[in-house]
Amino acid sequence: MKNNILIIGGGPAGLEASAQLQRMGYNVILIERSAKLGGHLAKWDRLFPDRVPADEVLGGLLRAAEGVKCFTDTDIRAINRLEKSYNVRLTNGITVLSDAVLVASGFDLFNAVRKEEYGYGIYNQVMTNADLEAYFKTGNDKRIENPKKIGFVHCVGSRDEKSGCRSCSKVCCATAVKQAIEIKQAFPQAEVFCFYMDLRLFGRHYEDLYLEAQKEYGVRFIRGRVAEVSENYDGTLLVKAEDTVASKPLKVTLDLLVLMSGMRPSASVKELGEHLGMMVEEDGYFSVRSGISAGQRSPQPGIFLAGAATGPKTLPETLADARAAAMEIERYLTEIFPDARNYKQLVKERW
Amino acid sequence: MIYEGKQKIWSEYQKEIPDDHYFYVRSCIRQSFFPASEATFLDITRNVLGKDIFETEHHTTCGGIAYHSDTIPQETVMTIIARQFALMAKHGYENYVCSCITSFGLYCETMETWREYPELEAKIRENLWKSCKLEFAKPKFLVHASDLIYKYRNLIAAQAVRKLVNVHTGEPLKVVEHIGCHYSKMFPSKGVGGAEYPYVLVGMIEAWGGEIVDYPERRHCCGFGFRQYFIKGNRGYSLSNTHKKFESMEPFKPDLIITNCPGCPYFLDRWQYVIAESTGKTYGQDGHGIPALTYEEVAGLVMGYDPWDLGLQTHQVGVEPLLDKMGVEYDPAKKYLGKDGKDLGSPQPCACLK
Amino acid sequence: MVDFGFGLVPSSRINLDLFDKEKYEELAAMEPDVRICMACGSCTAVCTAGKFVPTSLREAIEAIKNANSEKALQMLESCQLCGKCSMVCPRGINTRHLILSITKVYSKK
């Protein structure tokens, strides 16, 4: 008989894992809180570093997951752990007896309103990376009307004790460089500035993206965090930062400011954690069995994790994580789970 | 500007301000700079609004000037503050209101330090007992006098005889609000509206019919820090800070500046004179300056007090253009006459500043 | 005018609104790799003249971008054109050519 596997979260991690597990022959049930599948990927225009269209990648993921039972607008009502399996009651009334649960709850973007000094939601010409990505998709944003001087602020809500997140969000630097190029392509006469603390361009082709931004598009990178944004009489923005390389405070008048909002643990973590009895670390992401050798297993037998639920990840890392989780689930369901007599012993040895 | 964005932030930084029964402490220098401000505060709160604002002649400075100039250590200033609190407890009050904003910052700093280091609080208790046999109780609520006027702003508006409106054009006056640095920059949660978009003076202006000007250097210090101006060699920095603010607010053409600190209106007023006389530049219309008033003076003006009873003649920047805009009746001849009609002498006219 | 014994202090803040884009484009046309300097400081570290007198191509490029071309020229005054900076630049910039281009474009004739 085929095992049931419940996947919580219909973003890239959930979709990729469900496709793999279905291919392996399992009975996959995927639930997604919101009305649409695809998670944040559905809202993006082009992906760094090579600027492939996001909807192509999403299309591929959705096609591969065809045949998987997907319930959107669905959440968990209650979960009971039986001896080995999980009895899950969903909000759509359906009950699933699941032999393994994969948590792929993803991330939320930091709410940039909380960085009061940047004036998001107060000054008209301030927007976030998500807003800009939406602009690239739709061509429509009343803040963007032939801007002549554009600034990007790295690390908004990341590496920032005051807003509650010490760590780096990994993907924003590459996104900023990508968006700087894209906006320069849209407005070739504009001057573009990127205000950064450190440029984290660690992946393959990322350095080339940086070089391209500087060489082909003349983007100016200023090492210094934007500290204060105000509005001039004519509605333009007065931006203050320090050029730490020159060791001098700096000011510039900009027509548009884009805030690189960082990644935060999904708001669903608290509820999910309670339902499943899962532990969360100080940074708000779920704990894993071992950060290096068992990153897709939670400390509890039968509960698996994939994607940004365990920390900021790039999209290729998320997909690789999802495939690894599928493999871990398969190993669990063939080596540990079937042996009812020695289950507890096997969990002790091999989980 | 998206006003609703600011409103959301203001709603997050609400502060509990009790309605009545306060122990009031005065400022060291406000009575010299703005003679009628504290008197007007007491007149409005006690006589017009009927509140219980108590003060004793035995209270002293909070020690802020000496502390911020590095002449006394923190323990000494904490003991002085403890004595102030002891007087408050002795007279049966638990709400504390102070007139000076640096004091307010210092009181907040002291209370926070005591909260984090209870052993220091115990030591100060001992110090106070040894030095003057007094025991102190920490105030339950600590507010600044501008917080109180903010709390009463609608009561004042209800009894006001005029609004912050230009009677000739019908337009609201454009008002720049300047918050003292020590109000909320150190402890944003202790200020109404937080540190980035403080609401205490904005609330007053809105209640009294004016229009707020938000200009780029709004948050910038005016330069009244003791370290910035005590020594003549440093004073240029203080002057330049105020200059930066005026250059930034100029395009918005404000009619009035309202402040809640002892020093800020002083410098925003006097440095306009220095800038005018040393460079020839003025920031008001036709060679006038922009009047810089304390919130008590503005409250007094909307309540119908005589400008000369409010001490407005002591301002270096002439307030007459503002009074004319607001339609205030005043007698120019009485400007430099004392309470009994005695001639107090008048200042020499300035070369550049009218 | 009255002398009070103290006066306005000039601002030492960099004002990017004063950046001369036209002149910079003239320089970039001559030496496009001025755009790709990443301010690593390798050139300054090995500079022959820099051991004795403040000399730094990194600082000169930064000064140009910060609207301070006098400082840029000052930083390159003592350059010996020895080529040590070209040897070490990780981005492969032809630094000697860049130095000569900067002095050509920004010197007042």
Image (cartoon, rainbow, N blue to C red):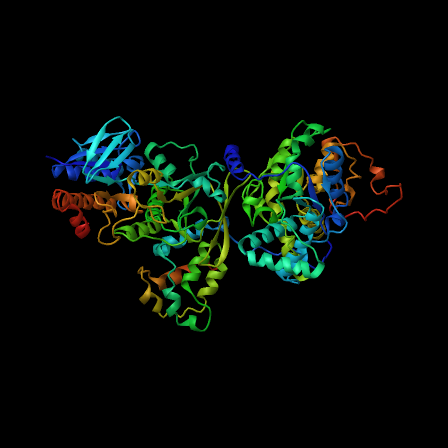
Residue B309 screen position, x and y as percent: 80, 39
**Relative vertical location of residue A7 with respect to residue A156 in this rendering, above or below:** above
Q: In the image, is B113 to the left or to the right of A34?
A: right
Residue A56 seen in this snapshot:
no
Residue A284 screen position, x and y as percent: 36, 46
**Relative vertical location of residue A324 with respect to residue A234 in this rendering, above or below:** below
Q: Residue furthest left?
A: A1
Instruction: Name which quarter of the figure residue A1 lies in.
Output: top left
Residue B294 screen position, x and y as percent: 69, 42
Residue B334 seen in this snapshot:
yes
Instruction: Name which quarter of the figure residue B234 lies in.
Output: bottom right
Q: In the image, is A53 to the left or to the right of B62?
A: left
Q: Residue furthest front?
A: A341
**Relative vertical location of residue B128 with respect to residue B350 in this rendering, above or below:** below
Q: Residue furthest bottom?
A: C52
Residue B186 screen position, x and y as percent: 56, 50
Between B142 and A122, the residue placed more toward the observer is B142
Q: In the image, is B354 to the left or to the right of A349?
A: right
**Residue in the image at 29% along x and 36% along y:** A39
Q: How many numbered marks are there? A: 0
